[in-house]
Amino acid sequence: MDNVFVKRVLRGTWVCLLLIALLLLAYWLIPLLYPFLIAWLVAYIMNPFVSWCEIHLRLPRWLAVTFALLVYFGSTIIVFSAAITRLVKELIHVTESLDLSIEKWKNVFMEWSQNEKLQSIMNEINRFIASHPGYSNTLHKNIDSTAVNISTAISRTVASLLNGVVNLLTSLPSLGIILLVILLAAFFMSKNWNQNMLFLARLIPEPFQQTAREIWNDLQKALFGYLTTQFIMISITAVIVLVGLLILRVESAFTYAILIGFVDLLPYLGVGTIMLPWLIYAYVSGDLSLGIGLSILYGLILIARQLIEPKVLATSVGLEPLPVLIAMFAGLKLFGVLGLIIGPVSLVIIGAIIRAGVIRDMRNYIVNGRLR
């Protein structure tokens, strides 16, 4: 009995050490190899189109890959260039509009502060402070510290924005080199796609090949299905918002549509995190036509999602909202904004590994000394 227990402990220790070694290896290799991982993903996405060009256009493989790269990357560069140009212009306009709104609310506050009832309350406060000098000193100190904290926060925000712009400009040469590496790697990977896949398959030991195939088949459905679903839903939301804001003649409609579409990634909260405060602000500020228009637009988005989302989700593996929210928060903390995508994707990958029976096989190996 003791001998069996010792063997289980040794096998469990071996499995834990192997998992830790794999995680450390991934942590060390991914920063070095991520351009090639991106290139492999590009080659995988292009492969159906490349095969179509080979069969229907009768192009040699290298020419079909070159044509596919031109189509995919050319289209992406054109779309992103146009979108970023429009986004920058509208962000500048949004900043100017924000300054006008701040000035407007400042005037409203000044008018409100001159109200007779408020003035009488202020006079009572002043008389109280005059009769209690200690409170006056404390109040002035608190006001001074608050002003210092606000100015420091504003200075840090402006400095971080400027540093971000400087870092982006200084990183352009390295980004260009990375993009060139991705293009070349994608070309060579796609050119010899079948041979590369056979080589990778031979690297996997025979006992694990069936499990690897199950994980890969599940990932193709779950991961790419999830990403496709999110892209479709974000695009639909952004298009509806853009059309609605253009009808309402809202300036910088493109920027708002992109922002609201991106926020739609959040489960349950979604577009409501921006639309609800915006329409409430419109009602409070007296712009009833905009408030009613935004309310109708928000209702249309909710109805469209209820009608379209079940059909779109039917093609992918659905995820529960709470685990997705936890994964997004953890990803945001670990990887920044990209973590909003990395978190749920990691959740999908973990789910595929569990469904393929990897956890069950590890347990069987630890307890019984065999995989299955």
Image (spheres, rainbow, N blue to C red):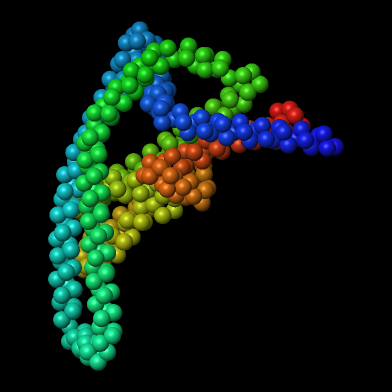
329 vs 207: above or below? below
Q: Closest to the observer: 202 or 352?
A: 202
Q: In what quadrant of the picture does the N terminus appear?
A: top right
- Residue, x 64% and y 18% (percent of image)? 206
- Residue, x 27% and y 79% (percent of image)? 139
Q: Residue furthest right?
A: 1
Residue 119 found in image quarter: bottom left
Q: Is residue 328 left or right of residue 13?
A: left
- Residue, x 33% and y 21% (percent of image)? 181
Q: Closest to the observer: 14 or 121?
A: 14
- Residue, x 22% and y 62% (percent of image)? 151
* Percent of width and height locating residue 176: 26, 26
* Percent of width and height locating residue 273: 36, 56
Residue 292 in view here: no
Q: Is residue 111 left or right of residue 364?
A: left
Q: Closest to the observer: 222 or 18?
A: 18
* Percent of width and height locating residue 14: 66, 32
* Percent of width and height locating residue 73: 29, 25
Q: How many marks?
A: 0
Q: Is residue 285 left or right of residue 351?
A: left
Q: In what quadrant of the picture does the C terminus appear?
A: top right
Residue 341 in view here: yes
236 vs 192: above or below? below
